[in-house]
Image: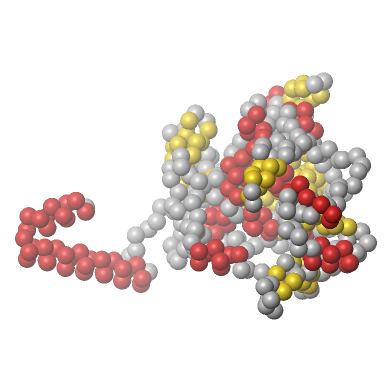
Amino acid sequence: MTSFTTARLMRGGTKRTLLVVSAVILVTIALVSIDKSGQNSVQSQPILEPEGKKKPDHRDEPTTHVAEGDKITLKNITPKPILDWHNFFEYIEEADGCSNIKMFGGKPYGGTNVLDGDKAVCLDANVAPTPGSCIVLSFGISNEWSFDDAMEQFGCKVDVLRGRDPTVSESRERSQPEGKKKPDHRDEPTTHVAEGDKITLKNTTPKPILNWHNFFEYIEEADGCSNIKMFGGKPYGGTNVLDGDKAVCLDANVAPTPGSCIVLSFGISNEWSFDDAMEQFGCKVYAFDPTMGQQAHLRGHDIHFHPWGLGGATGVASYHETEIPVYTYRDILKKINEEQSIIDYLKIDIEGFEVDFFNNVLSDDVELLANVKQIGMEIHPVASESIRDQMWSQIRLLRSHNFSQVSSLPNMAGGNNYIFENKTVSLCYEILWVNDKFR
């Protein structure tokens, strides 16, 4: 329409130009008025964001998704935050959550009353250093020891790591205590080299020793829930092996509360046993799957189905020559109006795309995980070493955000199991994480 209107303007002369411009302005005003009044507005397609003022989330519009075979590939979908100094300072100046903060160390700077070198320490219960048994690692001294001395006087053992700071005086260097070091699957770090006042690091990134043996050992670790119950599941292919069942921790404080619990279930494939079981338990269930060819509907009493997919970016995907809507976790929470709610159970069974979900939520929206009590996910450690290493990194990050792995079960349905180093392992694992924040 733009090029057509421009051509008319060029041919019509000044009067016609004024008439057309006036008409465009009048039509624009009319459309805006109609939209504001809420009457006769154009209906949005089902997969679009609901109308209304959209809360800014500092992201550009997503680009398209393209399917290759059964897998959806994403083109240029990494959301780019709108980074400016206003947002930056607004973000880093947010501070709340400690009722007892004390400053340790510090000396007057340049003959003024302004202290420099002092550090804030939170002395709230459970997070405060315990005199007599606390350990402090101090990087960066530059011969200003006030903080280190104050922490030592408080009752902490202070390790000043001179290898990271060549400006530390020899006489104040404190070496790491000897003893057997707990293995952490990393190579020894390489040396630091000082060049003038600047420290350059040579090959210092610790590289995990990643191999399949360690990976299976790592993902099969599970402990920390005394009452685990399986929900759902049906016999697979006429066998006694159940498929589709999910572990749920029923320990106090983390168990779903019948009558008020919320479950998000991604990946249905017309197998509703888990969703039906959670509804019978007393939860409101949101179920999602864009590949079933079904419209949004209510199943049973409180299972709300939406034909949306979960992915690393919001957009439209092509799956088996059919366009399907795919959304980030944040955008789905917005669409169902549960962005601020406690999610009692987040089930993710999306056939390999859990990697894309984790890439997105752990990098851009990790704060949303703080409201999730339990995550039940099927992971697919296929033969790709790069995917394996991504999973390993993501699981480690999840653990660093207070999620404990309390159940890990190989999915033996459909010939998933095979022998690895005289041990039966699986192409699929059902893993349950519990958010320790709620314990």
Nearest the camera: 37 or 26? 26
Picture quarter containing residue 23?
Answer: bottom left
Position of residue 163 measured from the top left corner of the image (x, y, whole percent) = 76, 47
Q: Residue at x 77, y 22 (%)?
A: 420
The vertical placement of 398 against 12, above or below, is above
* Residue 267 visible in the displayed image: no
Position of residue 282 measured from the top left corner of the image (x, y, whole percent) = 72, 57
* Residue 439 visible in the displayed image: yes
Position of residue 27 measured from the top left corner of the image (x, y, whole percent) = 23, 66
Q: Residue at x 71, y 62 (%)?
A: 260
**22 left or right, relative to 374:** left
Nearest the camera: 102 or 406? 102
The vertical placement of 100 against 279, above or below, is below
**43 left or right, relative to 251:** left
Q: Give the tally of numbered discs.
A: 0
**85 left or right, relative to 343:** left
Which residue ends up furthest to the bottom in the rendered image?
113
The vertical placement of 291 against 58, above or below, is above
The quadrant of the rendering that contains the C terminus is: bottom right
Q: How is the image coloured?
A: secondary structure
Position of residue 351 measured from the top left corner of the image (x, y, whole percent) = 61, 36
Q: Residue at x 55, y 45 (%)?
A: 312
Nearest the camera: 6 or 172? 172
Q: Residue at x 86, y 48 (%)?
A: 175
Nearest the camera: 12 or 60? 60
The vertical placement of 177 against 140, above or below, is above
